[in-house]
Amino acid sequence: MAAVLALMAPVAAQAQADGQRPEVAAAAQAVGDKVVAWRRDIHANPELGNRETRTAALVAEHLRALGLDPKIGIATTGVTAVLKGGRPGPRIALRADMDALPVTERADVPFASKVTTTFRGQQTGVMHACGHDAHTSVLMGVVEALVAMKEELPGEVMFIFQPAEEGPPDGEEGGAEEMLAQGIFKDFKPEAVFGLHVFSTLNAGQIGVHAGPTMAASDRFNIVVKGRQTHGSRPWGGIDPIVAAADVIGTAQTVVSRRQDISKQPVVLSFGAIEGGIRYNIIPDQVEMVGTIRTFDEGMRQQVFADLINVAEKVAQAHGATAVAQVPDTKGNPVTVNDAALTERMLPSLRKVVGADNVVDPGLTMGAEDFSFYAREVPGLFFFVGSTPQGQDPKTAPSNHSPEFFLDESALDIGVRALLQVSLDYLNDPPRG
């Protein structure tokens, strides 16, 4: 409850670090209350990927009120707008994601989500358990701040409010790849793209950034083990897919532990859901399993695919069952790479916001981000903003995607200031040559 009381208190402006642009601190303070209000409203009304109609409408209405001309309905519910500054200069893009997760919220906040939905045939809550509500509201604040500076602003800025970062519904296209496929960079090709993500593994007041490969490639798999239904008292009368599936799960652990050289790059293979049977005394016909693969090396990625298919098919066969292994079963996200030169150039900007001691290198992150698609088109920089309250150990704090994920709202102020500082520093002093 103490955390909730702290959350409800007015969010104090962060102390200005050496070299921070004075207009950044002033702008962040001017939009601070609005950003908090937007975040709480979006948090209480979360929407899954490709269904962010209310959120997209809120964003578009805000952009219009600022005099911009937003394009809507991109990649189903995406919104973009371009701000032309009053002075010549470079082009950049700023991106935020809008979608929530099928998670039932347990965080003790007054604006906790009560929204429910059906996902993969099961009733579940819907929650901004990853912090995309913060990303959307931060970018809304940054838009307002940059519009207020329009006459003195050099260059042009594209604002990207993206749906379905967590993935579109089965059978649909969505996310960053679809935004690009529908041409958002066709007529407006930025020189650089920037994004941020609130992160539970850092305390509020910290910013994390890593040059080069930063977040893992992410691929989803689906394995269906098919047996033959029989009564639970007569297992010999059929073929038990549950036992076979359990053996597949166990043996699949050797794909990483015994088949991959993890001294080269880390690899993760995790099962996330298993479904089979409806009654205690009936052995079912089949079991379905889904999971995720995370890699940083393309060769290792392809080898994991092949090894998992081999394990699923051969282990199932050993039980007299069969396996249909779709590995991967959808298009995955590539590795998120922070352009080394851009990262080095913008590090001083981030240090100006929170101080040099509070900008840390988190190393490789096994989480994935479809920001990676933008960063394959143009140099990109994706950084993390700490969200765990100071004094709480981020190693034990509820993580992103947890039903108890908690955002210290001082992270919103830092997010606004960091994105503004990076944008203004780049626009006013772009790379030469």
Image: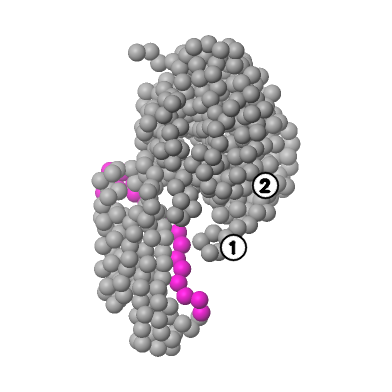
Disc 1/disc 2 C-alpha distance (Å): 18 Å
Toward the viewer: 75 or 153?
75
- Label 1 residue SS: strand
Q: Give the residue at x 25% y 46%.
A: 299
- The answer to whether residue 173 is visible is yes
Pointer 1 or 2: first along the chain: 2
- Label 2 residue SS: helix
- Residue 351 x/y as whole percent: 51, 23
Q: Residue 373, located in which quarter of the rendered image?
A: top left
Please give the residue where the numbered disc 2 appears in the rendered image.
44
Find residue 123 and name its label.
1
**Please, which colouring scheme is shown?**
one colour
Q: Is residue 186 above or below residue 269?
A: above
Q: Is residue 341 above or below residue 254?
A: above
- Residue 379 x/y as whole percent: 39, 27
Which amino acid is tagged 1?
A: Gln
Q: Is residue 353 above or below residue 410?
A: above
Q: Give the residue at x 63% y 53%.
A: 105
Residue 124 located within the stretch drawn in magenta? no
Residue 268 located within the stretch drawn in magenta? yes
Q: Which residues are magenta?
A: 260-279
- Residue 118 x/y as whole percent: 57, 60
Q: Residue 7, located in which quarter of the rendered image?
A: top right
